[in-house]
Image (cartoon, rainbow, N blue to C red):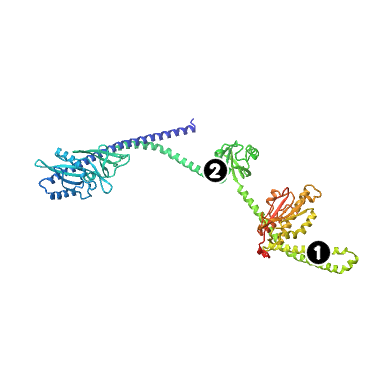
Amino acid sequence: MRFPFAKGVSRASRRWSLWALLVVLVLALLGTLVWLAGRYESSMVQSRLEHDATEAVTDIRSGLTRNIQTLQALQSGDRTPESWHASAADLLRERREIMRLEWRNETLDVLGFVETPYRTSVFELLGRGSLQTDVGLTCTTAGRLSGAAYSTSYFMPQRDGLGLEVLDMCLPIMVAGRLTGYSVITYSLQDMLGELVGRQLARGIGLSFTEADGTRLALQGMPSRGSRIYIAQQLLDLPGNTLVVRMESRLGTPALFPNVLTALVTAMSLALLAVLYLLARDMRRRLKVEHDLGEALAFRKAMEDSVLTGLRARDLQGRITYVNPAFCKMVGVDAKDLLNQSFPSPYWPPELAGVYQQRQEIRLAGNSLPREGHESVFMRRDGTRFPVLIMEAPLINAVGKHTGWMSAILDVSEQRRVEEISRASQDRLQATARLAMVGEMASLLSHELNQPLAAISSYATGSINLLQDRMDYDQPLAASVGPASAPLSEDLQLAMRRIAEQAERAGKVIKSVHDFVRRRDQVREAVEPRALLDAIMPLVTLQARKLGVTVAIEVDETCAPVLCDRTMVEQVLLNLSRNGMQAMQAAAFEAGAAEPSPREKVLTLRIRPAASNAQSRWVEFSVADCGEGISVEVAEQLFTPFFTTKEEGMGLGLSLCRTVIEQHGGFLGFEPAQPRGTIFSFTLPAAQPHDAGPHAA
């Protein structure tokens, strides 16, 4: 019985053996072709280059011999200097390689010379006389050989900053077997390469004269560079001197498939075709399956990486077997730190780890899990907590077996934040609506209360007038009856005047509140700070007597008048004073005192410059109580509209007080008092000399 696994292993081994055979054949074919082609083509190129170098040397030697024959013809017969000069000039126009031609006598004195018309004189800088010794040695050698002799090459600098490598050839002039003089020719080595070597040979190669040690003397063409350079060298043996002709070429790089290897290529190609045919059927199916599988895996990977929902898979033991990038980013932990992790998970808050572990054990013990989601709290790597929504479902494999659980996790922290912002916005809208309603009520009350207050003021004034008339009428009677009725009438008059003053003050307060709500321009005037306290002291004293509070006043007489809306600032002082007295009363009763002692309840009203010097631009007003103080939680919302700690309060007093002070350009704040209590203080701008009268602000 053959198992599928064994069949797969056999098929894989057969496929690998076919691949190994194909690789061996391809490597053997390519290696053989490259080796044979390289050897063959290299030998062919080198042979061709050697042949060209030999022909180049032959061309140079032929050209030099031709020049010697021409020179001998030039010196034959009787020549006058004029005729010699004309013939020599024609010779130099035909022979570009000759730089200078000289006619010397037997003592080497120059009888005449001609220079090439194609360039300036090569001896222009150093002169010909500096080389007289070398010419003498060359001509001595020529006389001894009874033929042409060549000197060693030498370098002649030119005016263009460059130079020229030249050599001399000396030919004896014999007439009837007797030496009558010498012909001296100066050759340019570079022009010898360009003029004496055939054009076909010099095309596409680098041709140069070198010495025996490899020193390059002259170059024709571009020198070849690189690793595949073919070089051929031939000796140019001249009487008195020997030069090396060097030829370099990069042409003729070996071909990969020369014709001589056609039979070998054909045989190996047939073997390759046979092997490829055997592999084609197997490879076609495997490639199709791999392509489909790769596309499926790539699609699933792209889908898992792009989804914003965190995905987590657990096995039956609760170990994490898979997490997607969204989940790793959500909890701030790398996938390698999460895989194969059991309980407790790294993203569980330590304080909730026990509860979560019990919950997971209960879920894993059941055969099925509810598919509806449940909320939980996870922890990031930095310790921050965030709410999540978890939806879990059983993980079933391809054969229908339950292998674990799959979870989809959503980070709902942003949703909770949006809900909180929406809730706060709703609260602000409600507060705004309540403020608008309060403004409307204030406007309505100010309109409705003006008439009753005016009536109270009128009745009080009328009562005072009646009492005054009664006192004038009863004065004789009071003298006979007794002095008791006169003080009674004075007390009634004082009370009625107080009633009229407070009714008028209430009218002003209502008018200021009405202007404040309607955002109208308020009239400000320069007021003495002490006058602001004196205006509210009757009401403060009345409530202090009722609550058993002692009122202390500290006024720095150096304070300058303040520029303010008098009525509104008096209300601020009155409101802060009432709050301080109520705070001390509440603190005393909470401590268990049946009747709080006035010594324990002191309200201090203080006025002083806001800076250390008396010339400060600001005046500070403060109200200090001896209550229990303000807690941190209450301090955060103390000036928030509609926030209050009193059962009967509306939560608008301190908010309106701060608004009034800020409209004056000042600041209202508070700080704890020592040893206990709270100090509320605010600042008002000092009046300038030109602010003596009231003006609108």
Disc number for residue 130: none
Amino acid beneath label 1: Met
Q: Quadrant of residue 534?
A: bottom right
Is 349 in front, or is 14?
Answer: 349
- Give the label, 1 or 2, closer to the camera: 1
Image quadrant in which the C terminus is located: bottom right
Examine the rendered structure and indicate whether residue 152 appears above or below residue 92.
above
Residue at 47% x, 40% y is 290
- Which one is in front, 665 or 448? 665
How far across and down, in percent of the image, does residue 200 sit?
Answer: 23, 45
Residue under pointer 1: 496
Q: CA distance from mark 1 to mark 2?
A: 84 Å
- The amino acid type found where label 2 is placed reads Pro
- State the image coordinates of residue 152 (x, y, percent, origin top left): 22, 40
Left or right: residue 554 versus residue 348 is right
Q: Is residue 471 visible?
A: yes
Q: Quadrant of residue 517?
A: bottom right
| Residue occupying the point 77% across, 48% down | 590
Q: How packed is label 1: few (under 14 Cα within 10 Å), some, or many (20 or more)?
A: many
Residue closest to the far left:
176
Instruction: Say what secondary structure mark 2 lies in.
Output: helix
Question: Residue at 70% of width from left, 53% of height from top?
Answer: 680
Label 2 sits on residue:
325
Residue sitting at the far right: 480
Q: Is residue 440 visible?
A: no
Q: Do labels 1 and 2 touch, CB within 8 Å?
A: no
Looking at the image, residue 15 sits to the left or right of residue 83; the answer is: right
Question: Mark 1 or 2 closer to N-term?
Answer: 2
As helix, strand or loop, the secondary structure at mark 1 comes to helix
